[in-house]
Image (cartoon, grey):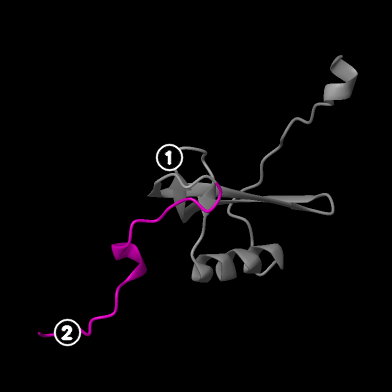
Amino acid sequence: MEHDSTPCKPEDKEMRCVFCGGETKKMTVTFSYEEEGKFFLVEHVPAEVCERCGEKTYAPEVTDELLKFAKDKFKPVKKLEVPVFDFAESC
């Protein structure tokens, strides 16, 4: 009996959502982040997205890169003006 010593690659395995157990699909998403009133978006981020609940999971190397954005290691490619609403005032 021969044993295949090729390590199993993570992309070879079917990923399941850690929250609901649904199947995930490789997609490119927009990552959003907020900390202490500072907001930013990162477009075109590779992720595994749950087809059931929509939860996004990022590979460790992607997460490492996203942390660099949080630490102001890059200049933004564009800036957006975003309207802010107060739900409590609308009731």
**How many residues crowd around disc 2 within 10 Å: few (fewer than 14), some, or many (20 or more)?**
few
Can residue 78 be seen here? The reply is yes
Foreground disc of the pair 1, 2: 2
Q: Earlier in the sequence, mark 1 or mark 2?
A: 2
Q: Position of residue 55 (x, y in %)?
A: 54, 45
Q: Are marks 1 and 2 in contact (CB under 8 Å)?
A: no
**What amino acid type should be assigned to the residue bearing mark 1?**
Glu
Q: Which residue is mark 1?
A: 51
Which residue is at the front of the view, 85 or 52?
52
Question: Which residue occupies 64% across, 62% down?
Answer: 75
Asked which secondary structure carries label 2, the reply is loop
Is 12 one of the magenta-colored residues?
yes
Can residue 74 be seen here? The reply is no
Residue extent of the magenta highlight? 1-19
Give the answer, above or below, for where 19 lies relative to 63.
Answer: above
Is 32 one of the magenta-colored residues?
no
Question: Which residue occupies 33% across, 63% down?
Answer: 11
**How many residues crowd around disc 1 within 10 Å: few (fewer than 14), some, or many (20 or more)?**
some
Q: Which residue is mark 2?
A: 3
Q: Residue furthest front?
A: 1
Left or right placement of residue 84 versus residue 4 in this view: right
Q: CA distance from mark 1 to mark 2?
A: 35 Å
Give the answer, above or below, for where 3 lies relative to 39.
Answer: below
Q: Position of residue 41 (x, y in %)?
A: 62, 49
Question: Which residue occupies 64% across, 67% down?
Answer: 67
Give the answer, above or below, for where 58 lies relative to 34.
Answer: below
Which residue is at the front of the view, 28 or 24?
24
Left or right placement of residue 45 versus residue 81 in this view: left
Which residue is at the front of the view, 76 or 16?
16
**What amino acid type should be assigned to the residue bearing mark 2?**
His
Question: Which residue occupies 52% across, 55% down?
Answer: 57
Asked which secondary structure carries label 1, the reply is loop
